[in-house]
Image: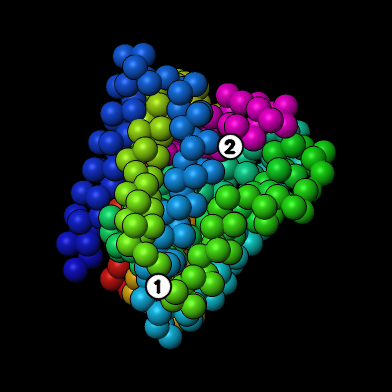
Amino acid sequence: MFLENLKTIAVQVGMLYIIAGIGFVADKAKIFSKDDARRVIDLLFNIILPIAIIHTFMTMEYTEEHVRGIFIAFVCAAATHIFGIFAAGIAFGKRLNSLERGIYRYAAVLSNAAFLALPLAKSVVGSEGVFYCAVYVGVFNIIAFTYGIYEISGHTAKIDLKKIILNPGSISVIIGIPLFLLQPRIPYFITYPMSLVGSTNSPLAMIVFGTFLANADFKRMFVKKELYLTSFLRLVLIPLCMLGIFRLCGVRGDLLVSMIISASAPTATNTAMYASKYSNDIALGSEAAAQSSILSILSMPVIVALASVA
């Protein structure tokens, strides 16, 4: 069973990276550059991803299992981030300067949940995967706009509490949950366009991801030992520990797989963007995200397959 699941998930991961390869080639051919990708990221984050999340909530069948799953997913997502913060705090202590330490901690704790975990969950689990991963993305945004910017700014940034709620990821979940609970009848001429727009999230996110890899410095990313430790925490330690904890707590099935897909995703691609915004090392942020992304090709199929046989 494990080997069958491993093969299935490896194929799904491989197909997503083939799409990323399109972005890689497009960048190298100067058809679709990293500057173009930045604008598409804004489109994805502010419009396409929220529409995909809202559509998933409004079309998900109302059941007691799904209602209970929302709360369990929230607890699992919060627990994963809290465990990650604790582990990263131990791994990257005072011997590093505050800015460098901040990037490593951010990269270890925050995964590429929106742009890689959601597409993979859609491929492996289906709409329920997006349903549960959307909750993870909501928690991710809370952590990113509080702990994340505090760390990556070298403890200088002020926390803007409005951004915890007033960001596209959180707003889409806030809108989506009532639609799921109330189950209103939405006209087809609204749901169908939303479905079409939402379906572009996965391929566009992976194409953008490919341009990101095309601009990575492959020589530098495999030199620093701290980057290997970051990837180990992000890709192995955190997801495996959470898999054990979730199983002990009785989490099973699609919910477990969805949470582990989110927990085992590589470092968030916005690591470099936040490094730039808060005057930190942009190159180091890019290297952390790029290295873990490459290594995740090997780690994610194994860990997700382990979750699928739980």
**x%, y% of residue 121?**
35, 57
The magenta segment is 267-293
* Residue 281 highlighted magenta (yes or no): yes
Residue at (28%, 55%) from the top-left corner?
123
Which is more toward the observer, 277 or 178?
178
Tell whether 139 sits left or right of 123: right
Residue at image mark 1:
185
Find the distance from the CA under tag 1 to the CA under tag 2: 40 Å
Q: Look at label 1 and name its amino acid.
A: Arg
**x%, y% of residue 120?**
34, 52
- From the image, give the main secondary structure of the stretch colored magenta: helix
Residue at image mark 2:
271
The outermost residue toward the bottom is 64
* Residue 266 highlighted magenta (yes or no): no
N-terminal label among 1 and 2: 1
Q: Label 2's element?
A: helix
Q: Does any portion of residue 140 appear in the rendered image?
A: no
